[in-house]
Amino acid sequence: MRYCQAMAWAAAGRAMIAGLEKGILRWLVDVLAPPRCPLCRAELESADGLCAACWPKLHLIEEPSCPATGLPLAGEWAETVASLPATMKQRPWRTLRAAVFHDAAGRALVHGLKFHDDFAPARLMARLMARRVRDLVEEGMVVAPVPLHRLRLWWRRFNQSAVLARLLAEELALEHVPDLLLRTRYTTPQTRLSGRRRRANLNGAFAVNPRHGAWVRGRTVLLVDDVLTTGATAQACVRALQEAGAGDVHVVVFALAGEPRALHI
Ligand SMILES: [Zn+2]
């Protein structure tokens, strides 16, 4: 009996030491590397946000918004959207939603995630995206990222859209299928091309992963990307999903390039 008691005390002692170690470790991390605002590097109370001064710099997009272009339908954009040619309002996706405009602050968050492995703002970005698509969520909907080609994935080590898609799926309690789409062809980076050439560059560049071929039929998909510029990449992905027989496809991006004339897909 006494031996058992001693064992229990020893186990409790070990647990206490482990807890203390964890606490000390957390305290050390907080002291040595306190959470910082991803935009201005000011110290923050909690890890996944911006400082009070930086929140207004982020240009949030609110409803109502145009389902084709993602642009807000109220305020300064209303007239611009109304004057867009009909061809720009015909898109393969059911709805396009964006969390913020791709201005200086939006771009800084995207670049932090893409080029500096700075995952700290990723949860904030996913939360802002979740806020924009919560009303579209339906049973059986799946979340999938715009894929990177294997070579680019190897070079960059991670797919920023997949990071956002995983966190977004968590926020919305939906299934995340990171390999639903495959990039079947290596393509020139889109940023170096004009709108029409972007579309040609992406012809046949995406396909539904044969592993999910039967499963995706009739399913509603929420396609995730970090930025939408001309929409050519999202369009090519939506077409690939439609060819495989998917149901409605909604697109959600963190940042939307605010110049609608650039959207000449
Ligand atoms: Zn700040």
Image (cartoon, rainbow, N blue to C red):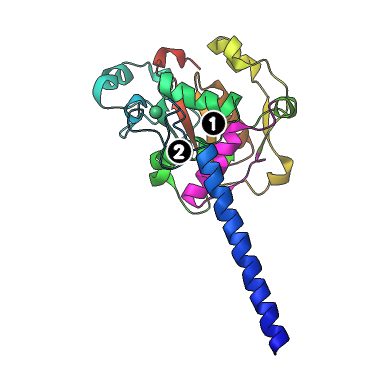
In magenta, the rendered stretch is 156-180
Quarter location, residue 62? top left
Q: Ligand 1 falls in which quarter?
A: top left
- Residue shown at the point (47%, 22%) measured from the top left: 107
Q: Residues within 10 Å of mark 1 (few under 14, many from 20)?
A: many
Q: Position of residue 86 (x, y in %)?
A: 39, 19
Q: Which mark is residue 85?
A: none
* 60 on left or right of 117: left
Q: Position of residue 168 (x, y in %)?
A: 50, 43
Q: Residues within 10 Å of mark 2 (few under 14, many from 20)?
A: some
SS class, disc 2: helix
Q: Is residue 165 above or below residue 112?
A: below
Which of 220/190 is in front? 190
- Residue shown at the point (47%, 41%) measured from the top left: 47
Query: Which residue has dot 2 on it?
Result: 124
Q: Is residue 224 visible?
A: yes
The amino acid at mark 2 is: Leu
